[in-house]
Amino acid sequence: MKGLRLYKYEKLCSKKAIEDLFAAKNNSVKSYPIRLIYLIEPFNGTPAKFYISVPKRKIRHAVDRVLMRRRIREAYRLNRNIIFDPLKQNSLSVNIAIMYMHDNVSDYALIEEKLKNALSELAKVIENNKDIS
């Protein structure tokens, strides 16, 4: 990947892949207000694909949900390299659902800090899962 740009192939769009991801709910990392649900697979061409969810039940106004998705996407874009090194070393791929779990809109600094913590935890999990085939 060149630079910090987010490419279309990094977004998790397949309905089946999203259903498989949420079926593996026990694979999650929490750093409140962020929760990552992940599914580690053998390398399939893209190191990581992501999906962002901001529940309507938590944040009622659409403009606030869009704002939170944008903040989460920006924080992921700048910090995704935390998980890329362990993925490349172990030739693995990961699908990630990033869920926002708080009732109110949070500022970007908090979102970035919590997402960094969650991605660091995920990197540790990836390093321990070397035997996936």
Image (spheres, rainbow, N blue to C red):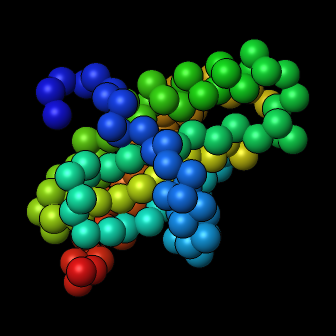
Asked if residue 37 shows in the view, the reply is no
Asked if residue 19 shows in the view, the reply is yes
Q: Is residue 45 left or right of residue 102?
A: left
Q: Is residue 85 left or right of residue 19?
A: left
Q: Reply above or below: 19 against 10.
A: below
Q: Nearer the viewer, residue 89 or 15?
A: 15
Residue 90 lies in quadrant: bottom left
Give the x, y percent position of residue 42.
Answer: 25, 69
Residue 131 lies in quadrant: bottom left
Is the C terminus in the top left, top right, bottom left or bottom right quadrant? bottom left
Q: Is residue 55 left or right of residue 32?
A: right
Give the x, y percent position of residue 87.
Answer: 22, 59
User: Residue at the bottom extreme?
Assistant: 131
Residue at image coords 60%, 28%: 69
Is the N terminus in the top left, top right, bottom left or bottom right quadrant? top left
Q: How many marks?
A: 0
Residue at image coords 50%, 49%: 14
Q: Nearer the viewer, residue 46 or 113?
A: 46
Residue at image coords 27%, 80%: 132
Q: Reply above or below: 34 against 95.
A: above
Q: Reply above or below: 66 against 15.
A: above
Give the x, y percent position of residue 60.
Answer: 87, 29
Give the x, y percent position of residue 77.
Answer: 37, 30
Residue at image coords 67%, 21%: 66
